[in-house]
């Protein structure tokens, strides 16, 4: 019964996101003419299925079982200080601290070779849309989601209390990858927009825009960029596997083996 429920939830999630994002991509396309079934669509669909049927549950299990380690590292006086705040103020702290951590953690993913081995799976997509947001190596997901949630654990929040916030972050991540260009003027410097993240997926590995929800960290640390047009192309200059299992396995292989595969 649990497996059937998981399949039903996955199907409903796919249907819901298709109904939300496909019309937006057709009415406000960032790249007009891009087809729904564009190249590597099926591989990204496999990433979607893997994330919802297996990897997502594994990440949540790891967070639930090992999140207390972070809390134990922080003196009780600090956690008591934060836990004594009103819930709305605690949420502001969680958002600010998680954005700070994910910003620097994301920059490290682009500058540290070992982290890039896994993160490049996400950047290997050459066509951005809502489905491409799910192309992510499971170990990369653990790293990212762990960083996002560390402040919540430090402040003493339980995952259940953050369910709505976690769901919003997930939908937001899908939205900023969608093939949508819906300029919102100066507001995008506060809450971000797809055009910002599209430039992050430019072939230049250090193109900028590393922030998660708000681009304020990029503005503060000098990595904010938003030209008034879309990048000419997305992807990476490295050769990568063209199959789902190939992209899962290749980052785990020693460097010299990976190089021989693509020689």
Image (tube, helix red, strand yellow):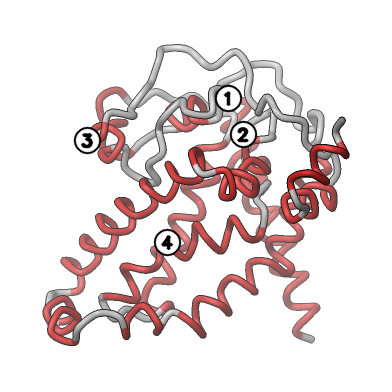
Q: Which residue does the numbered mark 4 point to in the structure image? A: 147
* Other-residue count near label 4 (Cα within 10 Å), few / some / many at <14 / 14–19 / ≥20: many
Along the polypeptide, which appears first: circle 3 or circle 2?
A: 2
Along the polypeptide, which appears first: circle 4 or circle 3?
A: 4
Q: Which residue does the numbered mark 3 point to in the structure image? A: 220
Residue 1 placement, left or right of 126: right
* Quadrant position of the C terminus in the picture: top right
- Residue farthest front in this picture: 256
Q: Is residue 28 visible?
A: no
Q: Are the two marked residues, 3 and 1, in contact with CB atoms closer than 8 angstroms? A: no
Closer to us: 180 or 263: 263
Real-space Cα distance between discs 4 and 2? 32 Å
* Quadrant position of the N terminus in the picture: bottom right
Question: Against 87, is 91 above or below?
Answer: above
Real-space Cα distance between discs 2 and 1? 6 Å
Q: Are the two marked residues, 2 and 1, in contact with CB atoms closer than 8 angstroms? A: yes
Which numbered marker is on residue 111? none
Q: Which residue does the numbered mark 1 point to in the structure image? A: 27
Query: Who's the residue at 48% across and 62% down the image?
Result: 167
Spot occupied by residue 88 in the image (x, y as percentages of width and height): 19, 67
In front of the other: label 3 or label 2?
3
Q: Are the two marked residues, 3 and 2, in contact with CB atoms closer than 8 angstroms? A: no
Q: Which residue does the numbered mark 2 point to in the structure image? A: 23
């Amino acid at each position: 019964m649990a497996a059937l429920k998981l399949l039903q939830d996955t199907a409903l999630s796919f249907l819901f996101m298709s109904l939300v994002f496909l019309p937006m991509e057709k009415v406000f396309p960032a790249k007009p003419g891009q087809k729904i079934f564009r190249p590597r669509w099926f591989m990204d669909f496999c990433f979607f299925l893997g994330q919802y049927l297996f990897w997502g549950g594994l990440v949540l299990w790891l967070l639930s079982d090992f999140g207390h380690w972070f809390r134990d590292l922080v003196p009780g006086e600090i956690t008591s200080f934060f836990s004594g705040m009103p819930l709305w103020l605690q949420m502001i702290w969680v958002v600010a601290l998680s954005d700070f951590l994910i910003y620097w953690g994301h920059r490290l993913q682009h500058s540290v070779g070992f982290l890039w081995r896994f993160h490049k799976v996400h950047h290997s997509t050459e066509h951005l849309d809502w489905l491409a947001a799910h192309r992510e190596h499971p170990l990369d997901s653990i790293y990212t989601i762990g960083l996002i949630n560390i402040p919540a654990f430090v402040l003493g929040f339980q995952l259940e209390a953050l369910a709505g916030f976690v769901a919003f972050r997930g939908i937001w991540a899908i939205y900023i990858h969608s093939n949508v260009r819906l300029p919102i003027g100066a507001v995008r410097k506060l809450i971000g927009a797809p055009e910002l993240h599209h430039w992050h997926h430019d072939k230049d590995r250090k193109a900028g825009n590393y922030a998660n929800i708000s681009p304020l960290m990029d503005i503060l640390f000098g990595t904010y960029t938003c030209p008034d047009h879309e990048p000419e192309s997305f992807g990476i200059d490295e050769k990568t596997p063209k199959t789902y299992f190939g992209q899962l396995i290749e980052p785990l292989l020693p460097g010299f083996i990976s190089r021989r595969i693509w020689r």
